[in-house]
Amino acid sequence: MVSIFSKIINREIPSEIHYEDDICIAINDINPKARIHILVIPKKPIENINSSDENDKEILGHLLLVCKKLAKKFKISESGYQILTNVGEGGGQTVMHLHFHLLSGNAVTL
Ligand code: AMP
């Protein structure tokens, strides 16, 4: 099934886009859980970390570096932020297309 994030990537559904390149897109979360809540999503429809493999190394590294770049853009590099990814329903994943949550403003406590 085509995920809602693939539809956003293909411009079939609107969203607030903060960053895009050949590998990924970064959008505002529609239901923010923090003052800043951005989703960094690979264009390749990897379901989650469980279904990633050695071939996805470059993509996974790239997503983290884009999180860092966005943290700088949103001026949260110094104050701090969280990068979080849910894996599977039991891990709280609701959209089955890999994404990193970039969060800042009110921390999720672990
Ligand atoms: P997760 O629960 O980790 O799978 O995260 C999915 C996230 O996607 C949730 O925080 C949702 O609020 C967010 N979300 C769902 N639909 C959209 C959408 N159309 N645009 C932006 N964010 C969305």
Image (cartoon, rainbow, N blue to C red):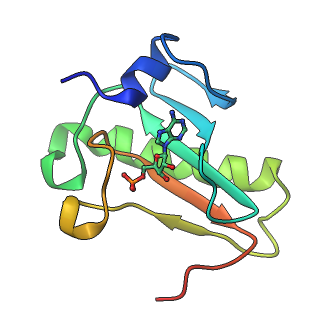
Residue most toward the bottom? Answer: 110
Q: Is residue 43 above or below residue 54?
A: above
Q: Residue at x 31, y 65 (%)?
A: 92
**Location of residue 47 by image quarter:** top left
- For the point 35% across and 40% down, the residue is 58
Q: How many numbered tags mark residues here?
A: 0
> Is residue 78 shown left or right of residue 59?
right
Q: Nearer the viewer, residue 80 or 56?
A: 80
Camera-side residue: 10 or 83? 10
Question: Which of the image's four quarters has the N terminus?
Answer: top left
Q: Can you give x and y, in whole percent of width and height, for residue 94 in the image?
A: 32, 51
Estimate the x, y position of residue 78 in percent, counting from the top left: 81, 72
* Residue farthest right in this picture: 75
Which x, y percent locates residue 88? 20, 59
Residue farthest to the front, as pictured = 31
Q: Residue at x 79, y 64 (%)?
A: 76
- At 56% from the left edge and 79% from the top edge, which residue is drawn? 108
Tell which of 107 and 49 is nearer to you. 107
Is 65 on the left or on the right of 110, as rendered?
right
Q: Is residue 1 left or right of residue 20?
A: left
Image x and y of residue 36, in percent: 73, 58
- Compared with 36, 82 (above or below) is below
